[in-house]
Amino acid sequence: MKLLYDKDDVPNARKLRDDRIKWLKELGAVALSETPLDDEGFLFSYQHSDEHYQRLVADHPNVTDRPEHRQELVRLDHVLQCLKERGINVPTPKTWVIEVGDAPPADLEFPLFVRTPKTSWKRGGTQSRANNLKQLSDEMELLRRTFGWDTPILARRWINVAISGKFMFGDAPQEIRVWIVDQHPVAWSFHYLHVVPSPTGFPPSAVDLRLLADMAAGIGSAFQSRLIVADFVRDRQGSWWFLEAGPGAAAGTAHEHVFKFVADQIRGGYTPLVGDAVGGQFCLVQFCPCISTRLARSMIKLPLNRVSQKHLHASDGTVALPASSIGRSVQPRRFHAAQQQSRSGQ
């Protein structure tokens, strides 16, 4: 399977200092416009609009993601609804959807973070936090002036996040992006690496990584896309919260080795990733079909019959997971216990 990119994205990538197309070319990726119509491939491209993507792949029936698969992931309200309908319960901030013309719900709990279904764009600093109805109204008006008068507004319960460092717009949270290939979590990366190269709170513990992989596996099982990203943030008590999911083909990262590892997985390759404090792979021992027995042994340095949860390693950004923990619905009770264990540092 070929790795593909959209040649029209190159100017935007240069302007944004986004190196993903460059990294894809180093892996042998080719432009979609130069690819035979019946070739199989996976397309990495920006999310311009649903109509734009449909036109882009219309004549390439064997190129994934298909438009309907990507569309499942572009709106947070749809993502949350899909998880609810499938009974996938992960810790996430309570969210109220306010349509145009609707009065604010009576059960709102301030403070709130305010965003649209498609973007968490905000004015920056503390102005994204609404402490009362007046501030909520002001934020909603600003977002609708920017994104359209009929834009639904998502008001989310505020999280007092743990801070990884500072950048030009204020505090950067301890946020991790989990990369999910064919419904299985394969890698993770610190989300603000492009502005905070040495973050506080990293690397995450083995317990943290196991918890994130388990949550991401549940989320990935709800969608058809071959590549999904799920973003999680840690609060000041040490608990992890699911923030949003999106199409991985349009998702950014500053971690070159993680991105190349994920792209290689998409095309069916397997080049072990040497992790670091801000990114690494999830080694799915006895689960991932692309990992041989010999390679799995070498990655964890233990006989497979001795692998257990106490043998989880995170010093190099890699964690080995028991196969039984992957691909099933996530239960709140399990997460409560795991969050407690994570906070205690066990």
Image (tube, rainbow, N blue to C red):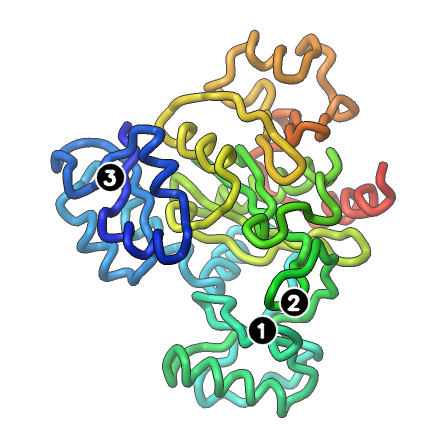
In three-dimensional space, the C-alpha distance between marks 1 and 3, rounded to whole angstroms, equals: 38 Å
At x 51% / y 67%, what residue is drawn? 120
| Picture layout, residue 295 above or below residue 154 | above
Q: Which residue is mark 1?
A: 124
> Which amino acid, mark 3?
Val
Label 3 to label 2, Cα distance in Å? 40 Å
Q: Amino acid at mark 1?
A: Gly
Instruction: Report the residue that reaches farthest toward the bottom.
Output: 134
- How far is the residue under mark 1 from the one under mark 2? 8 Å
Asked if disc 1 and disc 2 are in contact, CB closer than 8 Å, the reply is: yes
**Labels 1 and 3: the sequence-earlier one:** 3
216 shown above or below 243: above
What residue is at 45 percent from the left and 90 percent from the top? 101
Q: Residues within 10 Å of mark 3 (few under 14, many from 20)?
A: many
Determine the residue positioned at 62% across, 92% down: 134
- Does 270 sit above or below residue 110? above
14 sits to left or right of 108: left
- Give the mark count: 3
Which residue matches tag 2? 170
Observer-nearest of 41 and 327 = 41
